[in-house]
Each structure stands twice: as structure tokens, then as C-alpha cells.
Image: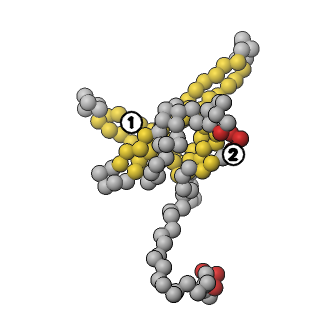
């Protein structure tokens, strides 16, 4: 029997704080922010509506200059995977942290009253595929040939 597994997270919520971008010693950008998601339900005994907010820490790798767009209160769509990591705190006790490693982040709208929702979704990060590298153009080499013209 083949074993299969899926680690996929989709969140639609509001940013709890402004995003923060830091850089690793190797110069790789790491943007982190928190997303609040709400759940409403009607209490069966009292008939009252109740609401619960869950917070998710999100980490986005190799995307610079996003902190300007990902500000507190903005509504976002986040797609990625769960990852749990551990570290030792100041007292030497092992701590565990579960976070969403985002593959895609899309701005859905602004804070109430900003009018950002009328503009529609605005992608602010690249999808899962890596950016294509561009070769420098050689003078006189552009003959209108595309990848579709190559027989293999």
C-alpha cells in the first residue's frame, strides 16, 4: 500500500500586525506576519452567537519589499504548508513553534473604509514557480523566433 500525505494550508484573514522583513546572513529575505481568522457559531444552549479568533504565524521566503503592502488590518489570502520547528529558550527549555510557510500571498482588500476591496485581488508575491532567468540579448540575434518554433 502506497502512503500519501498532504500538507496544505489555505487561510483568508486579516493581518494582526505589519509584516516584517529580515535577511538571513546569506542575504535571503524572510518576511513574517500574523493572520487572524474568525469563526462564528450559535451556542445551542443559550442561542447566542459566539465568535472565536485564531492566530497563525506566516513566514514567506525570498520575497522582498512586501512589508510595505502587508500592513495591519489588510485582508489576505495565504496558501502554503505547516511547519513545526524547535528552539531552546533563555532557560534552555525546548520550545516548539508551528507556522505556515507561504507559497502564495494575495491582498484581498484593505481595512474597512479604505476602498481597497473595490479594486479586486492584488497579488503581492510570486506563485510557487521560480522566476525565469533572462539571458542577456545579443545584438542582431532577435529574429522573432520563440520557443514554439523549436521542434524539440
Element at badge 2? loop
Query: Taking the image as drawn, is residue 12 in sight?
Result: no
How far apart are the alpha carbons under marks 2 and 1? 37 Å
Q: Name the residue under label 1.
A: 96
Q: Which sits in the foreground, 94 or 23?
A: 23
Estimate the x, y position of residue 106 in percent, counting from the top left. 59, 47
Estimate the x, y position of residue 126 in percent, counting from the top left. 54, 56
Q: Which colour scheme is used?
A: secondary structure
Estimate the x, y position of residue 70 in percent, counting from the top left. 52, 41
Label for residue 151? none
103 left or right of 112 in image: left
Element at badge 1? strand
> Residue at horizontal 47%, vertical 43%?
67
> Residue at horizontal 29%, vertical 32%?
89
Q: Quadrant of the N terminus?
A: bottom right
Label tally: 2
Q: Name the residue under label 2.
A: 120
Amino acid at each position: 500500500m502506497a502512503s500519501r500525505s498532504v500538507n496544505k494550508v489555505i487561510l483568508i484573514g486579516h493581518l494582526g500586525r505589519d509584516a516584517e522583513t529580515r535577511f538571513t546572513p546569506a542575504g535571503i529575505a524572510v518576511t513574517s506576519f500574523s493572520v487572524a481568522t474568525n469563526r462564528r457559531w450559535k451556542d445551542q444552549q443559550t442561542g447566542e452567537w459566539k465568535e472565536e479568533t485564531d492566530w497563525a504565524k506566516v513566514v514567506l521566503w525570498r520575497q522582498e519589499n512586501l512589508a510595505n503592502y502587508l500592513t495591519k488590518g489588510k485582508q489576505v489570502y495565504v496558501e502554503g504548508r505547516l511547519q513545526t520547528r524547535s528552539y531552546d529558550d533563555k532557560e534552555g527549555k525546548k520550545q516548539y513553534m508551528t507556522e505556515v510557510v507561504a507559497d502564495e500571498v494575495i491582498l484581498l482588500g484593505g481595512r474597512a473604509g479604505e476602498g481597497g476591496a473595490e479594486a479586486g485581488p492584488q497579488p503581492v508575491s510570486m506563485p510557487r514557480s521560480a522566476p525565469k532567468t533572462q539571458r542577456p540579448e545579443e545584438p542582431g540575434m532577435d529574429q522573432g523566433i520563440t520557443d514554439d518554433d523549436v521542434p524539440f
